[in-house]
Amino acid sequence: MEYRFFVDDTPIRVFRNNEILGVPFLNAQPMGIYASLWDGSSWATQGGKYPINWAVAPFVASFQGFGVDGCEVVGDNIATCAAGPVYAWWNAQRYQYLTAQQIDALKYVQSTYLYYDYCSDRVRYPIEPFECDKNWYGS
C-alpha cells in the first residue's frame, strides 16, 4: 500500500508503506491536511543556493478548487471510516499503482521542483535512512 498525492492529475509525492522496515505508516489513524510556512534556509535550500528573499514577505499561499476524497472519520474513531461504503473509486484496480506515464511525470516533478529530500541530505543524515531506497521511483 502507498499513498499517492496528485496535483491536477500529476503525481507529486508517493509515500509507501514500509512498516515492515519499522517506518511508521498512516493506516490506523485519521489524516489531516495542513499548510505552513517555515524557515528552512539553513538546510532546505541546497546549502543556501536558493536563499529566501525575506524582503518580499509576507508570503501568502492560497488554494483553489481543492478537493480531497476519502472517508470521513468521526472524532478520533477510525472505525467509523471502516464502517462506511465498501466501494470507493480510489480502491479500483487502476488506482493501485502508478502507470509508466505517471512514474515519468513523478520523476519530472521531482527533478524539476524538488529542492530538498532528506534521503539525499548527507549533512544532516551522513548515512542514508534505510527506507529511502524503498521510497524512490528515481531514474
Image: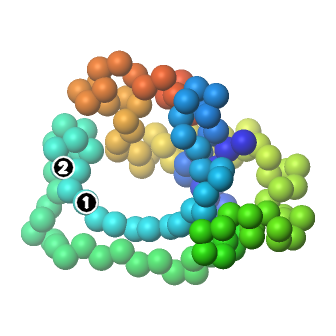
**20 or 62, which is in the foreground?**
20
Which label number is shown at residue 69? Answer: none
Query: For numbered disc 1, what is the local secondary structure?
Result: loop
Q: Which residue is mark 1?
A: 38
Q: Position of residue 119 (x, y in %)?
A: 41, 31
Q: Is residue 123 above or below residue 50?
A: above
Mark 1: amino acid = Trp
Q: Residue at x 43, y 26 (%)?
A: 129
Q: Nearer the viewer, mark 2 or mark 1?
A: 1
Distance from Cα at disc 2 to Cα at disc 1? 9 Å
Q: Residue at x 61, y 33 (%)?
A: 18
Q: Quadrant of residue 59?
A: bottom left
Q: Is residue 68 above or below residue 22?
A: below
**96 or 104, which is in the foreground?**
96
Q: Which residue is mark 2?
A: 41
Q: Quadrant of the C terminus?
A: top right
Q: Residue at x 40, y 68 (%)?
A: 35
Q: Is residue 82 above or below residue 46?
A: below
Q: Residue at x 46, y 40 (%)?
A: 111
Asked if residue 17 lies left or right of residue 52, the reply is right
Mark 1: few/some/many CA within 10 Å (<14, 14-19, 20+): few
Mark 2: few/some/many CA within 10 Å (<14, 14-19, 20+): some
